[in-house]
Amino acid sequence: QSVLTQPPSVSGAPGQRVTISCTGSNSNIGAGHDVHWYQQLPGTAPKVLIYSDRNRPLGVPDRFSGSKSGTSASLAITGLQAEDEADYYCQSFDNSLSGHVFGTGTKVTV
Amino acid sequence: EVQLVESGGALVNPGGSLRLSCAASGFAFANVWMNWVRQAPGNGLEWVGRIGPKAHGGTSDYAAPVKDRFTISRDDSKNMLYLQMNSLKTEDTAVYYCTRAAYGLDPWGQGTLVTVSS
């Protein structure tokens, strides 16, 4: 089972701002491990959206931003667009499990 | 271009075995940690395991549900990653992705479907 908890779904109108939370524990996010965010469009492989808490890969619009505090992290999408409809996952590393862990996933509806 | 291409997915009976392959290109494969991640139909992403570069002893780690049944290996001379899956269960049915640990997990292959069913 996932050790990082996300809301199952969030929705917003075009142009609005939405945020997705990712809640972990002291063995993963709280231990200082980087948090990464992925976007998965229907029928495709996941793609990195934010890496190392708040960094955007080349080509990712600045409408997407990441933050981290304590045992939680957040992904914000501003200026929501129809093409942002997708599943979003956070990911970190867990010391207790000695492996990577993913969030439960959040479906964004525009 | 950095690219990962998985192959080997198939329909297999419970209790059977299967080996997946992942061909890497466009980067220094021997120097990086490589991972397998799976996604059951309609479900979220689940980390399966990883293998380190020879410089890190080629060590591997596995998620609890697959530990002692799955084995990850690599052939750096061929830029190939493998996932040997034994004692397969119906709950192992999923699309399996290989992915590189770099700036998060990036890139991802297109995935290969493993179906465990009688």
Image (cartoon, coloured by chain):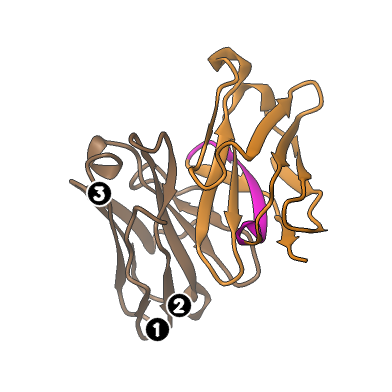
Chain colours: A brown, B orange
- Identify residue for label 3: A68
Name the mark nearer the viewer: 3 or 1: 3
- Residue B53 in percent (x, y) is at 60, 21
Q: Secondary structure at mark 1?
A: loop
Q: Residue furthest left?
A: A70
* Circles 1, 2 touching at the beta carbon (< 8 Å): yes
- Identify residue for label 2: A81
Name the mark nearer the viewer: 2 or 3: 3
Residue at the location (73% across, 59% down)? B113
* Label 2 or label 3, whichever comes before in sequence order: 3
Amino acid carrying mark 3 in the image: Lys
Give the position of the N terminus of chain A as an image quadrant. bottom left
Figure check: A102 above or below A29: below
- Residue A80 in percent (x, y) is at 39, 76
- Residue A11 in percent (x, y) is at 36, 81
Q: Secondary structure at mark 2?
A: loop
Residue range of the region highlighted in magenta in the rendering: B91-103
- Identify residue for label 1: A14
Cα separation, mark 3 vs mark 1, equals 26 Å
Cα separation, mark 2 vs mark 3, equals 24 Å
